[in-house]
Image (cartoon, rainbow, N blue to C red):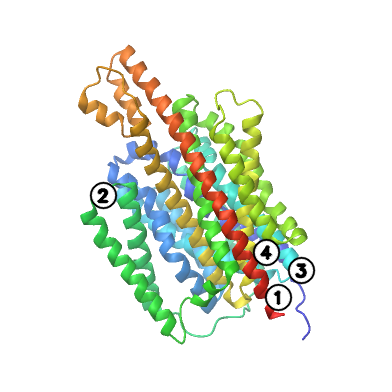
Amino acid sequence: MIPRQPDPKRWLVLLAVMLAFLPVVLDMTILHVAVPSLTQALGADNAQVLWIIDIYPLLMAGLLVPMGTLADRTGTRRVLLSGLAVFGVASCLAAFASTPVLLIAARMLLALGGAMIMPCVLGVIRRTFEDPAERGLALGLWGTVGAAGAAVGPLIGGALLGHFWWGSVFLINVPVMLVVLPACWLLLPRREVLTPGHWPIGQAVLLILGMIATVYAIKAGFGAKQPLALVLPILAVGVTLLWIFARLQLRSTQPMLDLSLFSRPAIVAGIVMAVVASGSLAGVELTLAQELQYVLDKTPLQAGIFLVPIMAAAALGGPVAGSLSSRLGLRPVACLSLAISAGALARLAVSDLQNAGLIVPALLAVLGLALSIGLTASSIAIMGAAEAQEAGAAGSLEATGYELGTGLGITFFGVSISVLFGRQLILPDGIPASLAEQAAQSIGDVYIVAQGLGDDEGAALISAGKAAFSTTHSALLTAAALLLGLLAVLVFFLLGERRRDAATQH
């Protein structure tokens, strides 16, 4: 069999799909800095604000696998182009939404477009780059866009809000789509190897509803602290729907998702790495951002500049991972990146951010580089273990891991901050009981309560809040370091199984 010649336009194709991926990643984090502005402009209440933020990752988590398998059935090019068009239209609708309900609806449409784009990008890379070394480099460059895009989202949002209205954080997507859509239409091949069979829409609905119900129950129960009487029935419905979906996959002659993918240790290792590493990165960024602003009194822009070493190093991690994996092998690169990340976090947990010197920026750079390498290694593991016709399904599984990891990481860290902060806070004497209860919720509430107190009492309360949050911040970074260390051990064994499987096949 004559090997297929590489596509001479493959690097242009990579550039096009990376540009398509960038706005999807930016939208995961860019909105956070715009929340105060849009809340006041639209008159949104707290529940509406939570839905505006959460509906995007929540709905996307349920849509990624169905959209990935749809791409395998009907063609990656068709689904990707449709997703780009949907994302562009939804960005316009979100930018000019006049009510919270309209913005929530536009965010739902954005999630649909994003869910069509993300697995297709990975699928295109898998199909375009047959050579493992080139594929590793391509996935490394893709990982750079993902890591750097998510990291600079708040900085871009802050810069836009300094000159324009809140809708500009969505409108910035439109010119990107106007360039990327025709580029992808021209560059992507019109003939593809498709997975035979029809797309089972009933199974898709089961998976979407099951994922949404399960993730919502987890976020509502742990994040929003809703009563168990509400959370448990929703969780039961979600788990039941997912169980029915899994049973259908095992019995169907044309399943939507080939569950045999989970029998491959490399794919399991890659998905676990995607969930834990992305969750740890999102949680650590959330914790550090609050420490810098609430405890060290930095502005959002100053906090963003402080975190630049993470962003800059993360931008280098993707290509480095691809190069190292082809030279040293995936297993040592993946395990060492996770172990180094754990070490950097453990050292940051006991560092004095007020007197950062050179050690803290260096640690942030090491953390960004190592985590970026780890996330890219997860992509190489998954896509290297998948056949070309499985690329969309495998890519959607990885993207689901990123979404779930980011959402659950923020939820876990957010809840942990609240619980630990309340236990560490030592209130000064004379604070009324009702105000004391509010202040114990979060450091943000400490500042709100302090505004209603006298100067001396307010200053004492803020000082106590800063001390409690610094202790909380150290405990959480230590916990994240321990989690990444355990993950390094797990990945070592899982990728060892991958090597034995490969040896057996040969």
Residue 453 appears left or right of 335: left
Instruction: Please state which of the two labelled residues, at mark 4 or mark 1, is closer to the viewer.
Output: 1
- Residue 155, x across and y down, in percent: 54, 38
Look at discs 3 and 1 and give the one toward the viewer: 1
Mark 2 or 3, closer to the camera = 2
Q: Earlier in the sequence, mark 4 or mark 1?
A: 4
Q: Quadrant of the C terminus?
A: bottom right
Q: Which residue type carries mark 1? A: Ala
Tell me if mark 3 has few (under 14), some (14-19) or many (20+) residues whose alpha carbon lies within 10 angstroms of its own: few
Q: Position of residue 247 (x, y in %)?
A: 38, 79
| Cβ atoms at labels 4 and 1 below 8 Å apart | no
Q: Nearer the viewer, residue 442 or 190?
A: 442
Residue tagged 3: 8
**According to the image, label 1 marks what residue?**
503
Q: Earlier in the sequence, mark 1 or mark 2?
A: 2
Looking at the image, is mark 1 or mark 2 nearer the viewer? 1
Q: Which residue is mark 4?
A: 13
- Choose top left, top right, bottom left or bottom right for residue 326: bottom right
Q: CA distance from mark 1 to mark 2?
A: 50 Å
Alpha carbon separation for disc pair 4 and 2: 46 Å
Q: CA distance from mark 2 to mark 3?
A: 55 Å
Near-viewer residue (506 or 89): 506
Disc on the earlier residue, 4 or 2: 4
Res. 108 in view: yes
Disc with the residue nearer the chain's start (3 vs 1): 3
Read off the residue under disc 2. 226
- Relative height, residue 502 to residue 27 (above, below): below
Per the model, the C-alpha gap separating discs 3 and 1 is 32 Å
Q: Quadrant of the N terminus?
A: bottom right
Please tell me which residue lies in front, 266 or 176: 266
Relative horizontal placement of residue 80, taking residue 243 as reference (left or right): right
